[in-house]
């Protein structure tokens, strides 16, 4: 499940973090020019002009008949955020209120349908 910025560089896609005229590229394996940024995470900063594409990717789904964003996955579960905009529906579904108007839950991956990525 992808959620966040992704950049194409050197023929591959990387998680990315744009910052002005530069982009931080993140990899899960050591590679030429990448430096450790934590356990199992490596980073390389490249000029924005070298990036083949820079997009924001969200993964959307349907759970219990309602629309959601997928924020994360772990061990057969998906962290989902309700996008239907109706508080009574979110409350009926038993979602956790994360912030005003923002409702989230951990959903069993097997119950989630219509998974799709959207690139902006």
Image: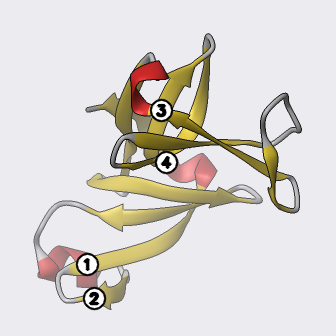
Marks 2 and 1 close (CB-CB < 8 Å): yes
Q: Where residue 114 appears, x then y in whole percent?
A: 40, 34
Mark 3 and mark 1: span between their CA atoms?
35 Å
Counting residues from the start of the chain, the first of labels 2 and 3 encountered is 3
Mark 2 and mark 4: span between their CA atoms?
23 Å
Mark 2 and mark 1: span between their CA atoms?
5 Å
Counting residues from the start of the chain, the first of labels 3 and 1 encountered is 3
Q: Where residue 42 appears, x then y in whole percent?
A: 78, 48
Marks 3 and 1 close (CB-CB < 8 Å): no
**Foreground pick, 66 / 116:** 116
Q: Is disc 3 placed on a helix, strand or loop?
A: strand
Q: Residues within 10 Å of mark 3 (few under 14, many from 20)?
A: few
The circle on residue 8 is none
Residue at the image point whose x is 46% and y is 48% from the top:
3
Mark 2 and mark 3: span between their CA atoms?
36 Å
Above or below for 73 versus 3: below
Name the front one of labels 2 and 3: 3
Name the front one of labels 3 and 4: 3
The circle on residue 102 is 1
Counting residues from the start of the chain, the first of labels 3 and 4 encountered is 3
Counting residues from the start of the chain, the first of labels 2 and 4 encountered is 2
Name the residue tied to disc 3.
47
The circle on residue 112 is 4
Q: Where residue 77 appears, x then y in whole percent?
A: 65, 60
Name the residue tied to disc 2.
99
Q: How is the model colour-coded?
A: secondary structure
**Foreground pick, 23 / 109:** 23
Above or below for 58 versus 82: above
| Residue 2 visible at all | no
Counting residues from the start of the chain, the first of labels 1 and 4 encountered is 1
Q: Is disc 4 placed on a helix, strand or loop?
A: strand
Residue 37 lies left or right of residue 68; in this view the side is right
């Amino acid at each position: 499940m992808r959620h966040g910025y992704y950049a194409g560089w050197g023929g591959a896609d990387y998680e990315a973090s744009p910052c002005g005229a530069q982009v931080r590229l993140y990899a899960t394996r050591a590679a030429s020019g990448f430096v450790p940024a934590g356990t199992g995470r490596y980073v390389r900063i490249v000029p924005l002009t070298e990036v083949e594409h820079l997009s924001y990717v969200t993964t959307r789904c349907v759970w219990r008949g309602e629309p959601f964003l997928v924020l994360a996955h772990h061990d057969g579960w998906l962290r989902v955020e309700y996008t239907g905009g109706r508080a009574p529906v979110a409350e009926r579904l038993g979602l956790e209120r994360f912030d005003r108007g923002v409702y989230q839950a951990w959903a069993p991956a097997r119950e989630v349908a219509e998974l799709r990525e959207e690139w902006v």
